[in-house]
Image (spheres, rainbow, N blue to C red):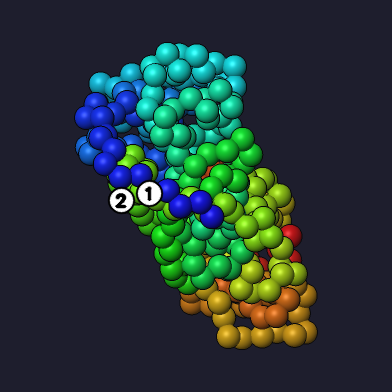
Amino acid sequence: MVIMNIENIEIEKELKIVFMGTPEFSVPVLDALIKNYGVKAVVTQPDKIVGRTGNLSKSPIKKLAEENNILVIQPKKIREEYQEIIALDPDIIITCAYGQILPKELLDYPKYGCINVHASLLPKLRGGAPIHRAIINGQSTTGITIMFMAPGMDDGDIISQKEVKIEDTDTASTLHDKLSNLGSSLLIETLPNILSGNYTRTPQDASEVTFAPIIKPEDEKLDFSKTTMQIYNQIRGLNSFPGAYFMLDGKRFKVWESIISNDYAAEKLNGEIVKIYKEGIGVKTSNGIIILTIIQPEGKSRMKALDYINGLHEDIVGKMIV
């Protein structure tokens, strides 16, 4: 552990901050920086082509930067296209869910370093989906880490952290908002210490490292051979994006909400629809029954599972979900 305690340092009034981020999660962080310090430039991912019309969609960070008349830089490959950023002579680079790994040339340039706002309590949940994975893994807490960036993925020294409780009712969406706001406030709280040198720099404990890889299509499919709690956590951990799903009669159904039943059906098969409850569709799991309450049939909008059942002209009890 290295303790920094540099006193009587005069912080520049015109601090040159370059911010790097892309999704909605980054917006409160950038907004706080704009209001408290000002931002010289924003680096974000290139606009994406969406829909059949081929229209370009700007990232949430680009929209906020343009609203505040801030220079926007959008390299396709930051490892090869970083000279424009260095030419700005940044004093500090702050990243939050940018989406690309920075080259060493950028990491070594700013006098105050490159700082990252990460949505977990590092060294836990390094990677691109820490919010989803925290819920899917059944964790009771998570948090925000402010850290110095290093060449590896989320492996830099820790500057500050703050914990938040994961409620049983939290989804990836609600936890996203909690952590986004927490990241904003913790950065503004921590930044003066970084600029003055009054901080503790704590290396991550390699023996405590866990990973949070991005969500893949195979992570979205429900497996009813798992426990009821595991399935419940998977559903809420993928809500509101990309969503968990199951297959019934060859059709794909997204599942957005569920509740845990106290019932048990030992004689039934895992994945079998065992009962229609007033709340929704009861499905057998390895250790009980989970009730699917909000679903989305293929090609349709979200709806209460019971509304879907009432619109059918057949009994689906006994059918297998796969």
- Which residue does the image show at 48% across and 25% down from the upper left? 109
* Percent of width and height locating residue 273: 67, 72
Who is closer to the viewer here, 151 or 101?
151
Q: Mark 1 Cα within 10 Å, few/some/many (few <14, many 20+)?
A: few
What number is the disc on residue 168? none
Quarter in which the N terminus is drawn:
bottom right
| Horizontal arrangement in the rendering, residue 304 relative to residue 78 (left or right) | left
Looking at the rendering, which quadrant does residue 76 occupy?
A: top right
Q: For the residue labelled by badge 2, is the local secondary structure a helix, a strand or a loop? A: helix
User: Mark 1 against mark 2, which lies toward the viewer?
Assistant: 1
Who is closer to the viewer here, 137 or 274?
137
Q: Mark 2 Cα within 10 Å, few/some/many (few <14, many 20+)?
A: few
Instruction: Check the image and report above or below for 306 versus 106.
Output: below
- Which residue does the image show at 54% across and 16% down from the upper left? 81
Quarter in which the C terminus is drawn:
bottom right
* Distance from the alpha carbon under mark 1 to that under mark 2: 17 Å
* Percent of width and height locating residue 296: 53, 53
- Which residue does the image show at 67% across and 46% down from the upper left? 217
Q: Which residue is mark 2?
A: 189
| Horizontal arrangement in the rendering, residue 130 relative to residue 265 (left or right) | left
**Which residue type carries mark 2?**
Glu
Q: For the residue labelled by badge 1, is the local secondary structure a helix, a strand or a loop? A: loop
Q: Which residue is mark 1?
A: 5
Mark 1 or 2, nearer chain start: 1
